[in-house]
Image (cartoon, rainbow, N blue to C red):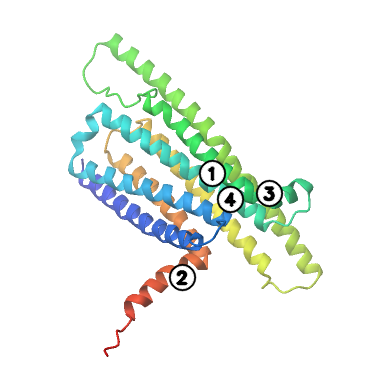
Amino acid sequence: MTPFAVLCLSIAVIESLAGVLGNGIILAASTSSCIGSKTWPQYDMIMISLSSSRLILQLWATLDYLISIFYEPVFSKRNMYIVSGTIFTFLIYSSLWFGAWLSVFYCIKVASFTQHFFIWLKLRIARLVPWMLLTSWLCSFTAAIPFALDVYSVHENFTSPLSMTNSSARRTTWNDRLTLLIYLWSASTALPLILSVVPNILLIRSLWVHTREMQNNATGFGDPSLEAHMKAIKSICSFFVLFVTYFICLLVLYSRVFSLFSDKESMCIVIMAACPTGHTMVLIWSNPKFQELPARIWHHKKCPVRTISM
């Protein structure tokens, strides 16, 4: 491993730990809103699922990066590759699905459409959210099964000297499995990514209609609905852009386009580690509830409660 690769992995560790901290804040704030209430708010249910899956994902990623730096030979073991790939795939797809449902939830709650189907969704979103989350877990588990069965097996080493016939056959097998990897990942990510794109389009359409109505009615631009539209669009756009980038880097890593722990692969790891952390920070900045928790903790530490002596 080159010094540049070690530097990149160290940056990835810092990015993942920042994501752990951010998701911990979201998880704590969302959980505190649900404690003591008979029915959990739908937004908090989605945020608890999203932040917990990302928290575990980034803790696992941090462990993975630290092992890469301090005990690299672990990655030469086939069983370690299978276990790591299975856990990563399950957590990654869980985060993708929960982020997609968050986009759908924003659209249903913020957009102002009057179509019957949209009104039907608004009225029944409370019943649908638990089923949406359960479906996400099942789809993520299904997506991880090929890794558990070692279907892809694209991590074989071709640098050792082989006969021409043997090498050609192994490269053909590698290309076939790489094609299978791309097809299966494209099929697995297609629906959640569509669920992210469509709400964004609908929100932009709703914002355009709402802005025209405000101009016609000479309403000021401090309208709460306008601000809600903008916050929702920022969250959905950032989620889509960051997770497309994330999956491109992930596909590059699993397809072994670059050699293990090379400089180019290490740069992909840095970009990949930054994506979920970036979206977490967007969620914290766009919701005052998530900003209040660290402020309260800081205020409590700065001004401790004094005990009164009798």
Q: Helix, strand or loop at disc 4?
A: helix
The residue that label 2 is drawn on is 292
The alpha-carbon separation of the residues under discs 2 and 3 comes to 30 Å
Q: Amino acid at mark 4?
A: Ser
Of label 3 and label 4, which has the lower sequence position? 4
Q: Are marks 1 and 4 in contact (CB under 8 Å)?
A: no
- In the image, 96: left or right of 267? right
> How far apart are labels 3 and 4 at the CA level?
16 Å
| Residue occupied by mark 1 | 133
Q: Identify the residue shown where x is 33% and y is 13%.
A: 168
Residue 74: x %, y % from top left: 21, 34
Q: With 4 as the anchor, is 239 left or right in this view?
A: right
Query: Which is more N-terminal, label 1 or label 3?
Result: 3
Kind of residue at disc 3: Arg
Instruction: Look at the picture and state if 285 lies above or below 79.
Output: below
Amino acid at dot 2 = Glu
Q: Position of residue 296 (x, y in %)?
A: 41, 73
For marks 2 and 1, give the CA distance: 27 Å
Closer to us: mark 1 or mark 4?
1
- Residue beneath disc 4: 103
Q: CA distance from mark 4 to mark 2?
A: 23 Å
Picture quarter containing residue 65? top left
Q: Earlier in the sequence, mark 2 or mark 3?
A: 3
Relative to 208, does residue 182 appear above or below in the rendering? above
Q: Nearer the viewer, residue 57 or 155?
A: 57
- Give whichever of 171, 102 is nearer the camera: 102
